[in-house]
Image (cartoon, rainbow, N blue to C red):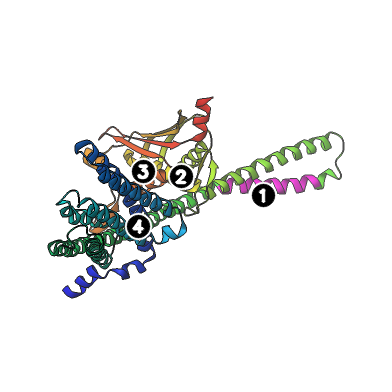
Amino acid sequence: MHLRELRAYIFPGAAEREPGFHQLITRLSLFGLKVTAGVTIGISFFATFSRLLLMPIDGLTLIDRLSATVWLVCLGLLAFAATRTAFGQRNARLLSMVLAVLVSIALNQVTLRVSALEPGIESYIPSQITLILLVGVAAVPLRPMQTLTLGFTLGVVYLLQANLAKQYLSIGSGAIPEHLLFLQTISFMATALSAVLYRQRYLNYQGYVRSLESAEQLRRAETRVLLSDHAASLGRLAAALSHELNSPIGALKSAVDTLLLINARLATADGADHERLLRLQADLRRSLHQSSSRLAQIVDRMQRFTNLDRADVLEADMNELLRDAAALLSAESKHQVAVELDLHPLPKILSRPTQLSAVFHGLLTNAANALSGGRGRIRISSRSTDEAVEILVVDEGKGMKREDLAAIFEPRFHTAGGRIASGNWSMFSFRRILREHGGEIEVESQEGQGTRVRILLPCEACLQESSV
């Protein structure tokens, strides 16, 4: 098990086979290339000008340092330009390693040239290479073996440059064994650091994926709970609405039968009797139209409360949804509730009406359940503010304890009658639905004094009206 974990740390390439993590690494590599390019430009300017301000420099040394600065700035600008190309975006990690090697060559070259005039400056070379390696590890998501390769490459570059400069240019003292040993040690340390950082990135990614999966499972659980509550409400409402459907259906049947009789008598009627039958026929036609309109309203109302999982986004009148919810609550024989409506004209809101209808009906059902004996008064009001539509639902029920109010939106399970039951899932789901619409819900309650629920829904039309 330990060997397997060690292998996962040192050779984590299989992790990038996951498309999501591969995209993450690609994005971080591109950002790391930009950071590396920016550090290259910034450090070169800072090192050169701070040297000019703090220490005297002769002409040849100044030319060498300015040349190195120009070279480093050009490398940084080229790296920035590469981030805008398709090749650079796909191979940002490789380009970062190439940039590190080129920067090391430039710094080693200027240090070796200046060492002829400033003895001892060669001791800065290990520090320069260490800085380059650490910036690469910190900014770019290098794999451990890539970091080790980069560290050894920087060491080999130093070895070749130092020995060639001594042999052919008589500059410097050649590659110093202590420097090489130091660079090897730093390479191994940077590799270990890179392994830890890369593993941490992968574990963070896995945690993020698991959190998304948990959120999706929670969303599905919320939807199932909300659908279950909604279906139960519709089951109760179906019986309550049967009377409301029977009334217009009975009126339609009676009107049709009467019209048939009138039409039969019109053929033989004359004079005043004919006129009376015509007036009665007109009255029956109006009754037919009213009954059919009432049936259409009932059907529309039921449709707005069905298909809760539909994703239709429509412009809806919140007052119409509130009236429907209040009518359905009043139709339930279980509740003898006086519902008072104080609805001001509202602009239509782009929303998912079926979901908001479920929220409004659920809040009214909660308010009715909180009334003592199922009897009492519920006040519903609406108005538009400068930025939103505000809806208030106030009941005269038993209210809530402070600790229950504090946890009103926290889904939980509890035991009731020896059985495990869920609690607060409906309120949790209501808040999620409202937040998906960009809105918010607030609950105020005191034990024995009722509850006040305030809903805010963003409204673009409200902003436009307020700006006129």
Name the image quarter holding residue 159: bottom left
Q: Amino acid at mark 3?
A: Asn
Sooner in the amino-acid sequence: mark 1 or mark 3:
1
Note whether 443 is above or below 177 in the view shown: above
Front tag of 3 and 2: 2
The residue tagged 3 is 366
* Magenta region: 245-263
Residue 14 in sight: yes
Q: Is residue 257 magenta?
A: yes
**CB-based contact (under 8 Å), mark 3 and mark 4:** no
- Quarter placement of the N terminus: bottom left
Q: Amino acid at mark 4?
A: Ser
Sooner in the amino-acid sequence: mark 3 or mark 2:
2
Front tag of 3 and 4: 4
Note whether 196 is above or below 353 in the view shown: below
The CA distance from mark 1 to mark 4 is: 75 Å
Near mark 2 (Cα within 10 A), the count class, few <14, some 14-19 or many ≥20, is many
The CA distance from mark 2 to mark 4 is: 44 Å
The residue tagged 1 is 253
Sooner in the amino-acid sequence: mark 1 or mark 2:
1
Q: Amino acid at mark 1?
A: Lys
Name the image quarter holding residue 53: top left
The residue tagged 4 is 29
Question: In this view of the protein, which residue sits in the foreground, 117 or 214?
Answer: 117
What residue sits 23% from the left and 41% below the top? 58
**CB-based contact (under 8 Å), mark 1 and mark 3:** no
